[in-house]
Amino acid sequence: MRIVLLGPPGAGKGTQAKLLVEKFGIVQISTGDILRKAIAQENVLGSQVNSYVLKGELVPDSLMVDLIRERLNEKDCRNGFVLDGFPRTLEQAKALDALFKELGFSISCVVEVQAPLEEIIKRLILRWSCPNCGSVYHLENNPPKEKGICDICGLPLVQREDDKEDLIRRRYHTYQELTEPLSEYYAKKGVLIQVDGMKGISDLGNILAFRLLEREKTFKR
Ligand code: AMP
């Protein structure tokens, strides 16, 4: 399966991507995680993208397309992947089409996870995550067993620099302006599925898995 996840920040793309990885044995490619790791490592990519990510702005398309080209050429992508956070602009979507053509891939499906701004703010301002394993917690709805500590790794949790209300609003508006038009782009190609990101994590995961398998069956018939 080759799945693209669209949706505003905080809609639950990362969480659903992890469930898809478990269910279908594919790899998750989160461009946000790749960029944050590069920033933490203070490598060349990190220094190129640092100021955009910290301000909640999009990184230039050319950098992102190069990064995805390199990642999709890695061996572990051959059995399928879920793209979480790419594409985010029409230019990136067109570059992805060209890249898929080059690699002989086709998109199985594009999933748009929908969620309203006010709900997203509530979710993100109380979101903390583990810098090691990526587990995500919500201080009210899904708190860690021990305050501030990852249940799995036992390491202190961190809050993302861009999970502050003004930046969340900015990221959401950027999404509306530059990324939302992609749902029409993919709907025209007949590959779009829209789901309600307000559903519970496992309910949404089950709905998504069901709809993806249905699509695969129809496609194979
Ligand atoms: P995310 O974790 O997906 O919310 O991404 C965090 C930040 O990384 C975004 O606010 C952007 O600054 C940057 N970013 C991630 N993916 C992309 C992309 N496809 N295009 C441009 N910038 C991106």
Image (cartoon, rainbow, N blue to C red):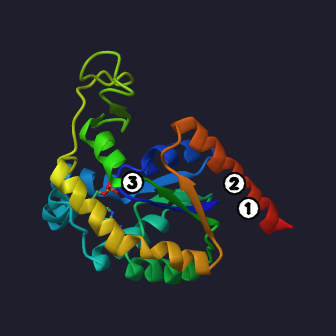
Q: Total label count?
A: 3
Farthest-out residue, right: 221
Mark 2: few, some, or many residues within 10 Å (few <14, many ≥20)?
Answer: some
Q: Is mark 1 in CB contact (under 8 Å) with mark 2?
A: yes
Q: Amino acid at mark 1?
A: Arg
Other residues around mark 3 within 10 Å, as few (<14) / some (14–19) / many (≥20)? some
58 vs 115, left or right, is: left
Residue at which label 1 appears:
215
Q: Quadrant of ligand 1?
A: bottom left
Judged from the image, the secondary structure of the residue bearing numbered disc 3 is: loop
Q: Is residue 178 visible?
A: yes
The residue at which mark 3 appears reads as: 116
Which residue occupies the foreground of this view, 35 or 85? 85
Q: Nearer the viewer, mark 1 or mark 3?
A: 3
Real-space CA distance between mark 1 and mark 2, rounded to the nearest whole angstrom: 6 Å
Q: Nearer the viewer, mark 2 or mark 3?
A: 3
Residue 205 in picture, x, y percent from top left: 59, 43
Mark carried by residue 211: 2
